[in-house]
Amino acid sequence: MKMITRRGLFLIVLIIAFLGGLGFLTYSLITDGHKWVMQPYNTHVYYDGELSAAGKITDCNGRSLAETVDGKREYNDSLTTRKATLHAVGDTKGFISTGVQNVYEARLTGYNIMTGIYSAANGGSNDMELTINADVCDVAYKALADYDAGCIGVVNYKTGDIVCMVSTPSYDVQNKPNDIDTNPNYEGAYMNRLLSGLYTPGSTFKIVTAICAIENMPDVYDRTFECVGEYDPGKGTPIECNAYHGKIDFKDALAKSCNSAFAQLAIELGPEKLAKTAEQLGITSNVNISGDINSQHGRFFLEKGDADDYIGWTGIGQGDTRIPPIVMLRLLGAIANDGKAVSYNIVNSFANQAGKALDLNFTKRETQLIDVDTAQKMKSMLRYNVEEQYGDYNYEGLNLCAKSGTAQIDEINANNTAWFVGFMDDEKHPYAFVVMVEKGNSGSKTAGPIANKVLQALVNE
């Protein structure tokens, strides 16, 4: 009798173990089945280690960016377009991890947990239309062609749709260079600099310091600062300015990008308030795109007890702060949109071969990064920058609000990182933008004209 009881208990344990294993296997199939299928050795969707059986990817105007033809992945006929859209689309081996072709490869093949990759094997893959405009991306790529590396991003700050995403250096995905891993001209070619690059922000960070001042110094607009070409905090390294501005107020200090004034503001505000503002504005957060693509986090180092000169340098964007360009793009878009940052999207639509829309489970959200009143004040100041400093005539018809930045990397000016960030204050063309050029010398002289070319192409297409 005891023997039967033991056997019964043993059988019950085996059944429980079996059911537990079956449950775990089922859970794994649901959550990780697409990863099991999308392995380079699966010849149903890969050929020689490269994705081959996937749906068509087009831009917002229906231009083909990638599609499968006779069992092989083919790209746009234009060499410029292939290079311009490389980092948005991605490659077939997954080296460009943030490209849609890699992020959505399982869904592009038509994989689902019920039929696996049956659809892909029988020509039933899914098609994707992106929000980017390939023609505008072409203009952006050509505008960056004279420089070693850089990126351009343009987003509709009302809807969150990304219309331009370009990173250089790039390469021809259809005819990949044999020396891509050894030629210094291709250094970082797999990285989307808009999302994954971390850069010293230079004077674009004065936007953050200005917001902190507006929210913590009620009399900031009534103040004046004396600029003698540098600001000596008393201890440490004097903070050099780009000119002798003399007596200057808050609004002109931003327009003329006065290091002396903003170093003083940063030191008076202190590290805790600056760090809190940077966090609230999303400087230390990543940017999510379409629910599945994530940028790098920004990095901001400032804490209680830091020396005044370090606080001053940080306040003008020359400390240890490192920001992905898309994080700065989100901030400028929020300023334009009454302080609200909308969630970003790069997928316009997704459908099967029968035209039935497929759900990517992406829900658009809004986050109030900045108080409405503060956003309006910053918008006015950024507009003043263009009117009084950069010149509306250089950006004809754009009604631009902007800030340049020239991040000093070493003693050679040519090695400076050039920035130009801002937005169009225009209901018909609600676009925010970021331009970043490595070894670009000057933000206003290098990145500014590039931004103008891209925005003019966008509004006049």
Image (cartoon, rainbow, N blue to C red):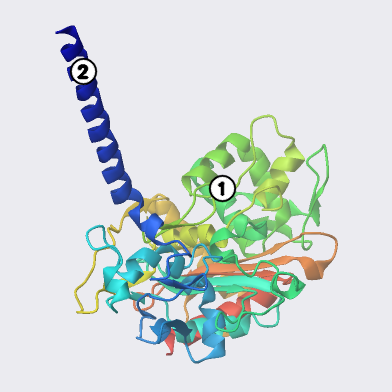
Q: Secondary structure at mark 1?
A: helix
Q: Identify which residue, 309 or 226, lies in the foreground.
A: 309
Three-letter amino acid code at the position of disc 1: Val
Q: What percent of the width, then of the height, locates residue 310?
A: 74, 42
Q: Is residue 351 left or right of residue 296?
A: left
Q: Earlier in the sequence, mark 2 or mark 1?
A: 2
Please give the residue where the numbered disc 1 appears in the rendered image.
220
Q: Secondary structure at mark 2?
A: helix
Please give the residue where the numbered disc 2 appears in the rendered image.
7
Q: Identify which residue, 451 or 386, lies in the foreground.
A: 451
Residue occupying the far right of the picture? 411
Q: Quadrant of residue 190?
A: bottom right
Which mark identifies residue 117?
none
Residue at x-position 58% and y-position 41%: 274
Please state, as top left, top right, bottom left or bottom right, where the N terminus lies in the image.
top left
Q: Is residue 343 visible?
A: no
Please state, as top left, top right, bottom left or bottom right, where the C terminus lies in the image.
bottom left
Residue at x-position 82% and y-position 47%: 238
In this view, 202 is above or below 72: above
